[in-house]
Amino acid sequence: MKRLLWIVVALGLLAGCIAWVLHARSSAEAVKVVYTYAKPERRDLRQTAVINGTITPVLSTEIRSEVSGRIARVLVEAGAEVTLGQPLIELDQSTLRVQLDDARLGVAGARLRTERAELEFNRLRSLAAKALVTEKERKEAEIAFRLADNETASQEARVRLLENSLAKGVITAPYSGRVLSLAARPGMIVTGADAGREGNTLLELADLTRLRVEAAINEIDVAVLTPDMSVEITFESVPEAKAAGRITFIAPAAGKAAGGNSQVGGAGGSSGASKDFPLQIAIERSHPRVRPGMTARVHIVTATSIQTLSVPHTSVFNDQTSGDWFVFVRAAEAKAEPVKTKVELGVRDDSHVEIKSGLAETAEVSLQRPPGVKFSQDK
């Protein structure tokens, strides 16, 4: 009976050993990696920074009235194309015309009084030369003549001022462009700059033949930018459109827009706490469907490398703690694991990265990281 029990125990141990060996073999086969290798190649690389921005007109104006009054007629509509000098809005000018007529009558009366004072002055001057009147009388006549002459000049200035105000009662286009928005309505009372205030915005006019992108770029890429650098622009709303552009303004400090004010939010996502530098990019050749307010994507070449040794992005791996980059080079033995090799990277494009040092041109690099190699960021 004991002999039978020992036989059963021995068979159980044998079965357990067989099962363990099979499990170990299957586990080893499960973690076995089939490596794919790529050969380094020499190619031209262009490193590109891509930033988002907003389309704005180079020339855009909020039109206000220089004089106060009531709007008599609005001569354009929102979206209308206008030309330089075209009348846009007319103010009621009836009161100004009455004031102008009164001022002109005042000028005529002042000139008559001046003429009379001049005659009297000339008469007394002749008599004073013959000692027939006193010097005091002559001097008083001269003063009266000069005062009358000053009054005439004052009345003429008032006429010119009213004529200028009357001319400003018709608001004209300062340049050719398109009416982007229109707030003016007939009968609206507007406050002009003559009242010492900013005045009402009546319409917004923009020259849509000259557009630009307002954006922001990070502190690393801004260091390689220069004014007049060429860029390529694409548009999210018009995928088929592409435009050439050039950088016209680079902020001298982070968050400082062209006007010198801090840029908060906005086209490039800049904020007061960020290290983004506002840019302005002139669009040299635009698509007819591109409009102000659209989102633009700016592609800026920040570095180039000609016929440099490069490998695919997927073959380089980073240790985030040390900041070092590594590749895994095919080992000399056919079945050996790839060898971890530290490299120095250079210019990158969308698919390849330059290897500046650490890799032989004849080597092959793995597109997979060996499972046994751990980096500091791996949990």
Image (tube, helix red, strand yellow):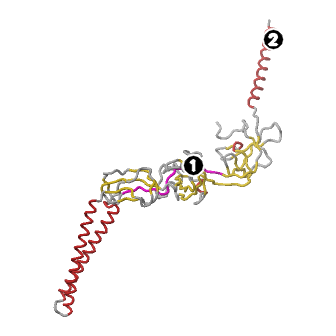
Name the image quarter holding the C terminus. top right
Look at mark 2 in the image and give the residue it sits on.
Answer: 7
Side of 300 where 110 appears, left or right: left
On the question of residue 338 being in view, the answer is yes
Residue 97 position, x and y percent, is 27, 63
Q: Main secondary structure of the magenta part?
A: strand
Q: Amino acid at mark 2?
A: Ile
Question: Is 346 drawn above or below residue 165 in the view shown?
Answer: above
As drawn, which residue projects farthest toward the right? 333
Q: Residue at x 33, y 65 (%)?
A: 164
Q: Could you say whether the residue bearing mark 2 is in a helix, strand or loop?
A: helix
Q: In which quadrant of the rendered image does the N terminus lie?
A: top right
Between residue 46 and residue 203, name the one nearer to us: 203
Q: Position of residue 136 (x, y in %)?
A: 18, 86
- Is residue 192 inside the magenta stretch? no
In terms of image quadrants, where is residue 61?
bottom left
The type of residue carrying mark 1 is: Arg
- Residue that sits furthest to the top in the current view: 1
Magenta range is 47-64
> Counting residues from the N terminus, which is met first, the one under dot 2 or under dot 1?
2
Camera-nearest residue between 163 and 379? 163
**Residue 273 visible in the displayed image:** no
Is residue 59 covered in magenta? Answer: yes
Q: Position of residue 224 (x, y in %)?
A: 61, 57
Which residue is denoted by mark 1 in the rendering? Answer: 297
Q: CA distance from mark 2 to mark 1?
A: 79 Å
Check the image and report above or below for 281 versus 363.
below
Q: Residue at x 68, y 47 (%)?
A: 324
**Image quarter for residue 90?**
bottom left
